[in-house]
Each structure stands twice: as structure tokens, then as C-alpha cells.
Image (cartoon, helix red, strand yellow):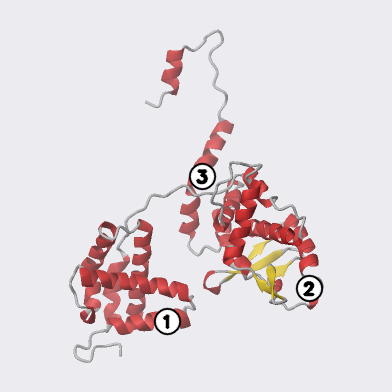
């Protein structure tokens, strides 16, 4: 029952249950993990209403979703719960999405949804993103010697992670039917919300893949199309690798490569390799919309903001290349005092 039988007002708990247990899994096709994150955000708001506004849980209604309650909630999360700005932004986006759904279901809730839309979470400092340099990347990609079958599998796994900028979950679910090695070579990745995108493959990667497939998937034309590209044997059957296994493979590659390239960070993870590929493309002048498609980003601002700081490095290199050498006038040697004046930051 979506309306209170006594007041005929929209019933919050009825809308919330329909949203979490009906709309999100059955209409949007979201994963249980995503749905749980939304539930936690809604529960967080209820905690605020109960603890700070002293509203009995059974009395919570859409009246308590007005703007001043939401503003108080944001301040409470920041000042009392000590949540990071990123966490608060996630909570607020969840609330906006829920109210947008409620407004679509009941026109009397449109004003609440519109008022929530203009709320802004606290800004968070944008930390420089971590990515590997060219030397570090080459060291990691070449870390596995290929002396054993497992080593050859792991080498192919790391190469493909980098070349496709795939999410780790997309690599673990990759199957033989997703590979297309004929010209133009590409593969299909299934990412968030079961959305599929096509990613081109480099010529060298295709060469590596052909050798890998001949060894690990002999006679692949007759094998099941859904056979995992990367697998381990479990009870005699090829079973897709877990996310933890792929992460461990990359950490092993980084640890091995660090012996010859000490600058490799201690905490190398799969997402760092994804960012490294994207940054390499960006610094080669590939337009952001193309990188956005490669990464599977739906929002252009995600990619633009993420890599904006790299523009400074590119500008600096361009300026250095375009600026002629500064030399003293013939016969005139600059004194230490003059050099201090010229190069001081004061």
C-alpha cells in the first residue's frame, strides 16, 4: 500500500521497499551489492531523523525529506559521523535517485525531488591519480618469464588488462565468444549494469593472444563459446578466475618487476593498470570522448575531471619544447644575486 489509509499521504516505507526490492533489481537490473549500498544510504538518513530530529521510525514520512532535513543530514554526516566527502556525495546521490523514482510514481512528490536535486555535497580534495610510467609499465608487463604454463597464462592476463583498460571483473568474465581476432581485432567487455562495449586490440596483443589460445584453448572452434578465457582447473573443469586471483597475479608481477624497476609503487592494483592505459592514450593526444568510450564511462565529466591534472604536465612539456634556451648576453656573466632575483618564487 503506497498511501497511508488515514491521511492518504504517500507512504515512505512502501515506496522504499518497492524501490529496493522491485524497481532496482527487476527494472534497472542492478546487482545485490549496489542495491545494498542504496539501502545503507537510506538507513543512514533514517538514523539521522531518529537520533537528531527525534522522529519515531514508525512516523517517518516524505515530509521529513524536505530540504532543511536533507541539509541537516549532510552536516551531521560531515561533523558528527566524520564521513569523507566522497561518502557523503554517494549518500546524497542515492537520496536524489530515490526521490526521483518516488516523483515518477507520485506527482505530489515532484517538488521534493526537485528541491533535493540542487543540494551539493561538500567538496573533496582531488588527489593526483596514480599511474605507472612507461618504464614501470614495461617492467610489469614483462615480469612473468613464461617458463611455465601458469607463468604464460599470467603474462597474457596482465598484458590484456593493460591493453584493454578493462575492469578486473570484466576480465574474469571474459569468454571465448567475446574474442574477435580477425581484422579489425577487438573484444567485447561486459561491465557495470551488464552493459557491453567493444574495445580494439593492438596488433602485438593479438599475436600474444593467438599463441595463448593455441596452448590453453586448443581446438577452440569446437569448444563451448562461454568457456572462460582465463581459468584454473577445478575438478577437471576450466573455471573462471576470481577477482582476488587476478589481483594477486598483478601484485606478483609488480613485486617481480620491482627488482629491476624500484620506482614501481608498493600497492599496484588492477584499477591502476586501467588508469595507466587511459593516461598513456591521453598523453598521446587521444580525445577524451574516445578514452571515455574505452573505459566505459557514462558521464563525460568523470573522465574529464579524472585526467584534468595531466593537462598541466602536457602543457609543461609543450612549453619546455617551445621555449628557446635562455642565455646571458655575450660577455656578461650573471651574478648569484641576479640569479636569485630571476629564479626566486617570491
Q: Which residue is mark 1?
A: 23
**Pointers 1 and 2 in contact (CB under 8 A)?**
no
Mark 2 crowd level (few <14, some 14–19, many ≥20, 10 Å Cα): few
Q: Which residue is mark 2?
A: 220
Question: Which of pointers 1 and 2 lies earlier in the amino acid sequence?
Answer: 1
Query: How many numbered circles does the render carry?
Result: 3
From the image, state whether disc 1 or disc 2 is nearer to you: 2
Element at badge 2?
helix
Residue 206 visible to the viewer: no
**Pointers 3 and 2 in contact (CB under 8 A)?**
no
**Whole-number angstrom distance, CA of label 1 to CA of label 2:** 40 Å
Q: Position of residue 236 (x, y in %)?
A: 72, 76
- Left or right: where does residue 61 sit relative to residue 149? left
Q: Nearer the viewer, residue 18 or 234?
A: 234
Q: Residue sitting at 25 percent across and 68 percent down? A: 48
Q: Which residue is mark 3?
A: 311
Question: Which of pointers 3 and 1 lies earlier in the amino acid sequence?
Answer: 1
**Whole-number angstrom distance, CA of label 3 to CA of label 1:** 41 Å
Q: Position of residue 162 (x, y in %)?
A: 63, 56
Q: Residue sitting at 32 percent across and 67 percent down? A: 117
| Quadrant where the image shows the N terminus | bottom left
Amino acid at each position: 500500500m503506497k498511501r497511508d489509509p488515514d491521511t492518504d499521504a504517500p507512504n515512505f516505507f512502501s515506496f522504499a521497499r518497492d524501490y529496493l526490492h522491485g524497481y532496482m533489481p527487476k527494472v534497472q537490473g542492478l546487482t545485490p551489492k549496489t542495491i545494498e549500498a542504496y539501502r545503507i544510504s537510506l538507513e543512514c538518513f533514517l538514523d539521522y531523523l531518529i537520533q537528531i530530529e527525534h522522529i519515531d521510525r514508525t512516523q517517518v514520512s516524505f515530509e521529513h525529506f524536505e530540504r532543511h532535513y536533507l541539509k541537516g543530514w549532510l552536516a551531521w554526516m560531515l561533523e558528527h559521523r566524520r564521513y569523507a566527502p566522497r561518502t557523503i556525495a554517494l549518500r546524497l546521490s542515492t537520496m536524489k535517485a530515490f526521490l526521483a523514482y518516488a516523483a515518477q510514481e507520485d506527482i505530489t512528490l515532484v517538488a521534493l525531488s526537485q528541491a533535493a536535486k540542487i543540494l551539493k555535497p561538500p567538496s573533496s580534495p582531488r588527489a593526483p591519480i596514480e599511474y605507472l610510467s612507461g618504464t614501470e609499465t614495461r617492467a610489469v608487463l614483462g615480469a612473468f618469464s613464461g617458463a611455465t604454463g601458469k607463468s604464460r597464462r599470467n603474462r597474457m592476463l596482465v598484458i590484456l588488462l593493460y591493453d584493454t583498460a578493462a575492469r578486473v571483473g570484466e576480465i574474469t568474465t571474459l569468454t571465448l565468444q567475446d574474442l574477435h581476432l580477425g581484422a579489425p581485432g577487438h573484444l567485447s567487455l561486459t561491465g557495470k549494469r551488464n552493459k557491453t562495449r567493444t574495445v580494439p586490440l593492438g596488433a602485438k596483443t593479438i599475436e600474444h593472444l593467438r599463441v595463448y589460445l593455441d596452448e590453453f584453448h586448443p581446438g577452440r572452434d569446437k569448444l563451448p563459446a562461454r568457456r572462460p578465457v582465463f581459468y584454473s582447473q577445478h575438478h577437471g573443469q576450466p573455471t573462471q578466475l576470481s577477482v582476488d586471483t587476478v589481483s594477486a597475479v598483478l601484485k606478483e608481477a609488480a613485486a617481480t618487476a620491482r627488482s629491476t624497476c624500484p620506482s614501481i609503487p608498493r600497492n599496484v592494483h588492477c584499477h591502476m593498470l586501467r588508469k595507466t592505459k587511459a593516461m598513456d592514450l591521453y598523453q598521446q593526444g587521444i580525445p577524451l570522448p574516445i578514452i571515455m568510450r574505452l573505459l566505459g564511462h557514462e558521464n563525460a565529466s568523470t573522465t574529464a575531471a579524472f585526467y584534468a591534472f595531466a593537462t598541466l604536465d602536457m602543457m609543461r612539456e609543450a612549453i619546455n619544447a617551445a621555449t628557446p634556451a635562455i642565455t646571458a648576453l655575450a660577455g656578461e656573466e650573471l651574478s648569484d644575486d641576479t640569479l636569485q632575483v630571476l629564479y626566486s618564487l617570491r
